[in-house]
Image (cartoon, grey):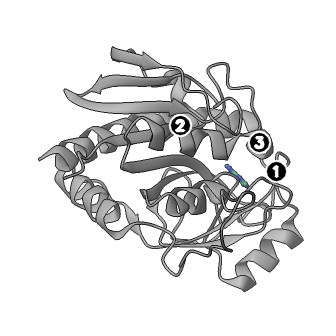
Amino acid sequence: MTVKHLAIIGGTGFAAFGDLKTIREQHVDTPFGACSSVLKTVELGGEEITLLLRHGPLHNIPPHRVNYRANVWALHEIGVTHIIGVAAVGGINQAASPKKIILPDQIIDYTYGRKHTFFEEDLEQVAHIDFTEPFCRELREIVLRASADIGLDLLDGAIYGVTQGPRLETAAEVKRMANDGCDIVGMTAMPEASLASELGLCYTTCAFCVNWAAGCADSKEKIDMAEVQKTVEQEILAIRQLLIASARHFNS
Ligand code: HPA
């Protein structure tokens, strides 16, 4: 029987995640180069999880330069079976307002030029994965139960449009995304989700909204980056509570 092991890929805001008791640190060499950070197995609210910082310990790796393949490979290599990828996003749908935590259930991928597959070289045969449901049901259920436990008003189900970045979108781009059905916009769920699927890992994104997407605020004002940063710092505390409760459910 495989031993279950939960990892969290932390994104924007994780520098302010607070002190966590380190159990072990692992540096993993991958055929795809270096991962974004050391793999730190920590105690989070008494639960053991492995943490990887997507944008690096100094938060200086932009979304389009993240080595998603190395990150996912390394986690798989050390025995991780389940991954929660945390991501800051902009809200397009009125229900996905700033400060809301969202558990998306679908993806539309607008990224380009990212190394997005393990099935590229030295193949015995062309390989395809089913990606009808990009996020793992089992882990979504765990996060949903955890959110109910802590009384969090989480938005269950949203289409996450993944853009290339690092710039934010134009208002017209967001309008097109809304027409496509996107509810939220972020820059990191792809290819993280599909790479995890390629390795048979159970992956879900836990998104938190930090601004209205371009052109979506009533005021039609530009997006204020200082305001976004403030929201990130406030929201990360709620994310932390949700992750602790999720880890508890995962291990129970
Ligand atoms: N667009 C893309 N990514 C984001 C946004 C946004 O408005 N906010 C946070 N991440």
Residue at (65%, 26%) from the top-left corner?
56
Q: What amino acid does circle 3 point to? A: Asp
- Which of the 4 quarters of the picture holds residue 112? bottom right
x, y percent for residue 113? 86, 57
Front of the two marks 2 and 1? 2
* Earlier sequence position, callout 2 versus callout 1: 2
**Residue at mark 3: C-beta within 8 A of ligand 1:** no
How packed mark 1 is, by other alpha carbons closer than 10 Å (few <14, some 14-19, many 20 or more), is some
Q: Which residue is the extreme one toward the left?
A: 252
Answer yes or no: is residue 235 visible.
no
Tag 3 secondary structure: loop
Q: Which mark is residue 224?
A: 3
* Earlier sequence position, callout 1 versus callout 3: 1
* Earlier sequence position, callout 2 versus callout 3: 2
Horizontally, residue 210 falls left or right of residue 43, namely right
Q: Which mark is residue 74?
A: 2
CA gap between label 1 and label 3 equals 17 Å
**Residue at mark 1: C-beta within 8 A of ligand 1:** yes
- Look at mark 1 in the image and give the residue it sits on: 165
Q: What amino acid does circle 1 point to? A: Gly
How packed mark 3 is, by other alpha carbons closer than 10 Å (few <14, some 14-19, many 20 or more), is few
Q: Nearer the viewer, residue 129 or 221?
A: 129
Tag 2 secondary structure: helix
Horizontally, residue 72 falls left or right of residue 215, namely left
CA gap between label 2 and label 1 equals 24 Å
x, y percent for residue 158? 51, 72
Horizontally, residue 91 falls left or right of residue 163, namely left
How packed mark 2 is, by other alpha carbons closer than 10 Å (few <14, some 14-19, many 20 or more), is many
Front of the two marks 2 and 3? 2
